[in-house]
Amino acid sequence: MTSAAPTSTFVTAADGLRLHARCHGRRAGGALPVVCLPGLTHTAAHFEPLATALANDPATPRRVIALDYRGRGLSDYDPEPAHYNVQTELADVLTVTQALDCLPAVFIGTSRGGILSMLLAAARPETIAGVVLNDIGPVIEIEGLLHIKSYVGKLPRVQSFEQGAAILRRLFEPQFPRLTRDDWLAAARRTFKEDEGRLVPTYDSALAKTLDGVDAEHPPPPLWDAFDALAAVPVLAIRGGKSTLLSAETLHAMAARHPALETLEVPDQGHPPLLAEADVIARIGGFVERCDVVYTDRGDVRHIISARRANRKERK
């Protein structure tokens, strides 16, 4: 039995901007909600196949929320580009998830979304029941970051989705050699939107300013402290086999620091894996179900400890 069709909802940020969230399914039983956080220029639409599958899982249907950060998708664009930073976006994530009453949750973070998930674990650990890190880790390879910098806010104007698909194919086919013509067209429809009779990107081109200081001599600092904040929760780290942003060496180091880390490599995909294939979705679904069990067990332990403490106080 399928759940109701997904809906859009809007939450007002602290500074008045409207933030969009795509809501799938509903919370049922002990199934934790899932919160999907996209990459730098991605939108909630990039999670549609995964969110639909998780919300309609016949064994464990659950509530899934996919966010558009400010300046992306259906969220308002910020008149001050300096606000496109992880601190503001982290506050926005908390605002939306608290307003929608979907915490604690399992977070699925693609690229920038994974960074925000790690930072959230460090700042508000009680909100995190598990994390999927999609092609992101504490060390961000400069090669991949410079590739992102080469096109963010610099895509040429396109006259049709077909032309947009051709541009995306030229940019990304080396990392995604198996995508078909229909796949590239679908990617174009996620990347461009119609606006007053023309096609424009689904994000504010001012996002390019977030990468102004990035070059080969100034790579981003490592985020090992933020990653270590995930030590107490289940983590699934996904890497594209052709990724230039998350190296195999970093993934190995992550596993050494988090002994319970699960890993998945998606062959013939680069940055970031699409999370749209049946086997990948099934793997993520199984991981999220294990998070349900771990969180429930921890809750039972907390309840037992609390009861024992109360009994000791009564005896005194």
Image (spheres, rainbow, N blue to C red):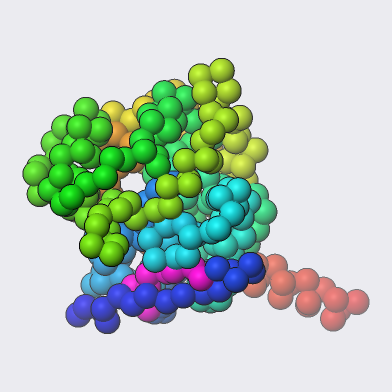
Q: Is 134 on the left or on the right of 105, as rendered? A: left
Q: Is 308 on the left or on the right of 264, as rendered? A: right
Is 204 situated above or below 228? below
Residue 177 in sight from this viewpoint = yes
Location of residue 17 by image quarter: bottom right
On-image quarter of the N terminus: bottom left
Is 254 situated above or below 280? above
Q: Is residue 101 magenta?
A: no
Is 191 situated above or below 173? below
Q: Position of residue 297 (x, y in %)?
A: 53, 64
At 38% across and 61% down in the image, what residue appears? 73
At 56% across and 73% down in the image, what residue appears? 12
Q: Position of residue 273 (x, y in %)?
A: 30, 42
What span is colored magenta in the figure? 18-26
At 84% across and 81% down in the image, what residue appears? 314
Q: Main secondary structure of the magenta part?
A: strand
Q: Nearer the viewer, residue 40 or 287?
A: 40
Q: Position of residue 292 (x, y in %)?
A: 44, 64
